[in-house]
Amino acid sequence: MEKQDYDVVIAGAGASGLAAAIAAARAGASVLVLEKNHVPGRKLLSTGSGKCNFSNLRVRPADYRAGGPAFLKRTFSALPPAEVHEFFDGLGLLRAEKDGGRLFPRSMKAQDVQGVLLNELEALKVPVLTLTEVLAIRPDKAGFAVEAAKVAPVWVKNAPAGEKRIYRAGRVVLAAGGAAYPQIGGSDKGCGLLQRLGHTVSALSPALVPLRVKEPLVKELDGVRLDAALALKAGGKTLAAAEGEILFTAYGVSGPAVLDLSRAALAALAGGPVRLEADFFGDYTAKAFREFLLARAAAFAGRPFRHFATGLLNEKLMRAAAWLAGIDWNAPAGPNLEVLAGTLKCFSLEVTGSLGFQDAMVSAGGGSCAEIDAATFASKKVKGLYVTGELLDIDGGSGGFNLHFAWTSGLLAGRHAAGKTAVS
Ligand SMILES: Cc1cc2nc3c(=O)[nH]c(=O)nc-3n(C[C@H](O)[C@H](O)[C@H](O)COP(=O)(O)OP(=O)(O)OC[C@H]3O[C@@H](n4cnc5c(N)ncnc54)[C@H](O)[C@@H]3O)c2cc1C
């Protein structure tokens, strides 16, 4: 039998690849990590707006789309979420909980998450070859021949092809991620590798992505950020709802609550018009809110509407709502308050589409979970192959769920890939 260079070769040094490398090396395997970016864990640095919302205290299968709850139920029994948190405790990462369960490094610096992972790999003496792209993974009698080439950093365009090399591995963990944020290395190349290994791969589409809306009015609201209760409506039905921050932009809306609804919005668009309704006073019933506005108008009797509006809600938004309700900003408050109450309780926008992968947090679609063992992340089609993270057809909501799945799948894959038995 041909000699292997490494027990385990890992393609991709993102969240799941780094976790897999640590787990495999701790289990005693010789490990090599190949990464096409100039730095391992590059995407981690951009997560959570540089703070890295690396997990959540309340991870449940229901927090994810695709894959199927049964798949994730099995995954989270094989590696309970608390054990992933303990993994990071063990690496020396102090954590802080924010906004009902979201976990961040206590320093609120994403580089600390990347740092503890890289420190551990250094201590375990695991080599990470950067600017090295995996081009092909070929199963053979001894395991796998992994063909890789030296590449230029992502910002260098049209660089000549670099030197190629074959690495021999007993097992391979394919941890190449999805297509989100191509500007920092996201690509569908991992899907191509997986497909060429005989796996079923569904088309990738942007998920957790800002939405475009029809109303030109949003341009005036660019930069306004506030909490709201959001409902997604189509054909007279509420398709999904979310509460949290909405951010108005020149093209539409973003913010965690919008991102959480984006997948459902894009899916529904195929069937007809979709509206996003924002309730800025979800803590009032419609009746109580009308009475509140009438009482406020009485208190501001004879004074311009702008006095009534100041302190109620963001000024740009109040100006827009007043315009929609036909209220003169400088005239006395009073007329059309019923319409204004309706507008502030149901600020309705027509969704026309979304931004692309450049602005999406994750990509939906990818490797079919039916062909992956949910407890080990071993391929059911190719012996010795493991597939992790966003490359699989599983995506979560915002709140640390996507990174949590990346760590979980990586740790399980690394642990199981470390089995020293040669692949025959
Ligand atoms: C801006 C942004 C913010 C985010 N914030 C959060 C957050 O706060 N919380 C959260 O839970 N999730 C967040 N996510 C999502 C999360 O980062 C991903 O779901 C997660 O990183 C996926 O892990 P992964 O290991 O599957 O892929 P990645 O982390 O993307 O890693 C894949 C790695 O493989 C490398 N690679 C790809 N192809 C090859 C190849 N052929 N050869 C060698 N290397 C290759 C890539 O360069 C990359 O380094 C965010 C995503 C983005 C884009």
Image: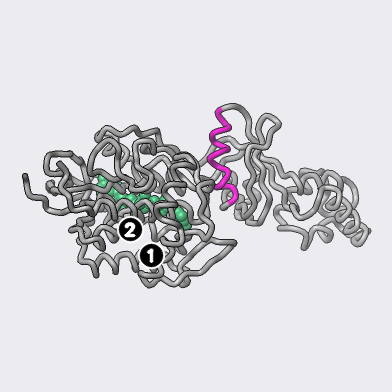
**Residue to which mark 2 is pinned:** 19
Q: In the structure shown, which secondary structural element does the residue marked by tag 1 occupy?
A: helix
Q: Looking at the image, do the residues carrying marks 1 and 2 touch, with CB atoms under 8 Å apart? A: yes
Specify the segment rendered in magenta.
Answer: 257-270
Quarter of the image with the N terminus is top left
Q: Quadrant of residue 203?
A: top left
Q: Indicate the amino acid at tag 1.
A: Phe
Q: In x, y percent, where is residue 40?
A: 29, 59
- Residue 354 part of the magenta-drawn span: no
Quarter of the image with the C terminus is top left
**Residue to which mark 1 is pinned:** 87
Residue located 62% across and 52% down the image: 246
Pointer 1: residues within 10 angstroms few (<14), some, or many (20+)?
some
Q: In x, y percent, where is residue 105?
A: 45, 68
On screen, residue 118 versus residue 317, left or right, reads: left
Q: Is any part of residue 157 visible from this angle?
A: no
